[in-house]
């Protein structure tokens, strides 16, 4: 009986120590941290200035390819995010990365994740999380803290993960400054359809209203060669037309060919070809995103490929 009593006493003291440790841990939190902990959810969340400013209940979905958060009707980018300052992204109550809002009219920018403001280049229902810079001095992609499997898991938990589009440069054929052909492979990573800007429908001039297109770059020598394409502006400047877009079906891949007849002369050598594949942005309102045959894809994709010009 003494052994049983001793065991109960030991168990009692262990429980006391356990709960005391838990209380002590809670006591270590300041008021802001306690308030944040109460309001967090186990989905994708964002905090700033000691407050939870976004939980999974506040947005419809997250496009992982463009890193755009599509807000619900009760949320406003201008009211909530435009003057946020520093922010932290959490997934399942775990801190993943931090960043800050940054006015895009400034010539400088911080290093790391940013929410661009003044303007954001998107409508009021979208929070764009960018990365500055995205290349190192040699032209290689820097690690991207926005791409984290813990974020993917948190988004999938509430069916808020959209994989979006991906794109790659498959080839660059530089014959001469009047004959440059770049081939891209565009892939839809979701099982539903997207509308994308189709250069065959816009023509090369209007397509380059939305992108600077192909650059051939020697990062070690700080040399960059680009297209001399005459850009055709949208009229009015903030308009768009469904006739400019084509549909890429769910899980489909499409080859896109762009031919340049006016390009800068590039000496033979080893280069990196860079390209920004564009989508629409501020032109599209929330009500216009859902079309009869899919969603209009917004954002842009930065891609590159090592090439040799002989």
Image (spheres, rainbow, N blue to C red):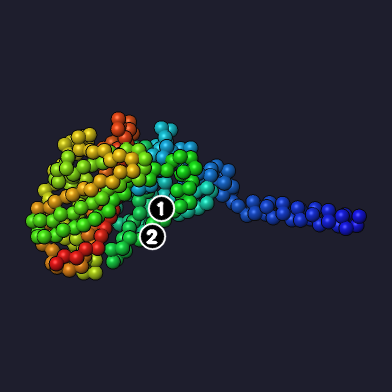
Q: Is residue 156 left or right of residue 264?
A: right
List x then y, in percent, for residue 165.
32, 46
Q: Residue at the spot x=35%, y=61% of the render?
A: 142
Q: Gap in Å between the C-alphas at discs 2 and 1?
A: 9 Å
Tell me the quadrant of the picture where the C terminus can be found.
bottom left
Q: Secondary structure at mark 1?
A: loop
Q: Is residue 106 visible?
A: yes
Q: Outermost residue, right direction?
A: 1
- Which residue position holds label 1? 146
Q: Residue at the spot x=38%, y=60% of the render?
A: 143
Q: Residues within 10 Å of mark 2 (few under 14, many from 20)?
A: few
Question: As rendered, which of 130 and 116 lies closer to the eye?
Answer: 130
List x then y, in percent, for residue 31.
59, 48
Q: Secondary structure at mark 2?
A: loop
Q: Is residue 69 visible?
A: no
On screen, residue 256 above or below 293: below
Q: Residue at the spot x=21%, y=45% of the render?
A: 210
Q: Outermost residue, left direction?
A: 178
Question: As rendered, which of 31 and 240 lies closer to the eye?
Answer: 240
Circle count:
2
Q: Are marks 2 and 1 in contact (CB under 8 Å)?
A: no
Q: Outermost residue, front direction?
A: 252
- Which residue position holds label 2? 143
Tell me the quadrant of the picture where the N terminus can be found.
bottom right
On screen, residue 257 above or below 195: below
State the image quarter where residue 68 is shown.
Answer: top left
Q: Is residue 136 left or right of residue 31?
A: left
List x then y, in percent, for residue 220.
24, 69
On screen, residue 269 above or below 198: below
List x then y, in percent, for residue 62.
40, 43
């Amino acid at each position: 009986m003494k052994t049983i009593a001793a065991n109960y006493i030991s168990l009692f003291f262990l429980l006391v120590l356990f709960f005391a440790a838990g209380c002590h841990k809670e006591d270590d939190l300041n008021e802001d941290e306690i308030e944040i902990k109460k309001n967090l959810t186990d989905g994708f969340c964002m905090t700033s200035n000691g407050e939870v400013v976004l939980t999974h209940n506040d947005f419809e979905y997250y496009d992982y390819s463009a890193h755009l958060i599509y807000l619900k009707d009760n949320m406003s980018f201008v009211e909530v995010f435009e003057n946020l300052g520093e922010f932290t992204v959490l997934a399942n109550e775990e801190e993943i990365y931090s960043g800050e809002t940054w006015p895009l009219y400034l010539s400088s920018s911080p290093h790391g994740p940013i929410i661009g403001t003044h303007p954001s280049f998107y409508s009021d229902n979208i929070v764009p999380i960018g990365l500055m810079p995205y290349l190192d001095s040699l032209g290689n992609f820097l690690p991207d803290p926005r791409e984290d499997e813990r974020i993917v898991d948190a988004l999938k938990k509430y069916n808020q993960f959209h994989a979006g589009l991906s794109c790659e440069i498959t080839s660059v054929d530089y014959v001469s400054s009047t004959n440059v052909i770049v081939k891209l492979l565009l892939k839809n990573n979701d099982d539903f359809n997207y509308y994308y800007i189709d250069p065959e429908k816009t023509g090369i001039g209007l397509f380059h209203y939305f992108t600077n297109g192909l650059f051939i770059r020697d990062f070690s020598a700080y040399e960059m060669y680009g297209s001399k394409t005459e850009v055709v502006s949208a009229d009015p400047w903030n308009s768009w037309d469904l006739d400019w877009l084509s549909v890429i079906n769910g899980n489909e891949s499409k080859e896109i060919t762009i031919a340049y007849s006016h390009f800068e002369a590039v000496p033979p050598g080893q280069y990196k070809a860079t390209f920004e594949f564009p989508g629409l942005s501020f032109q599209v309102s929330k009500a216009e995103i859902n079309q009869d045959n899919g969603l209009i894809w917004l954002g842009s994709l930065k891609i590159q490929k090592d090439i040799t010009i002989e």
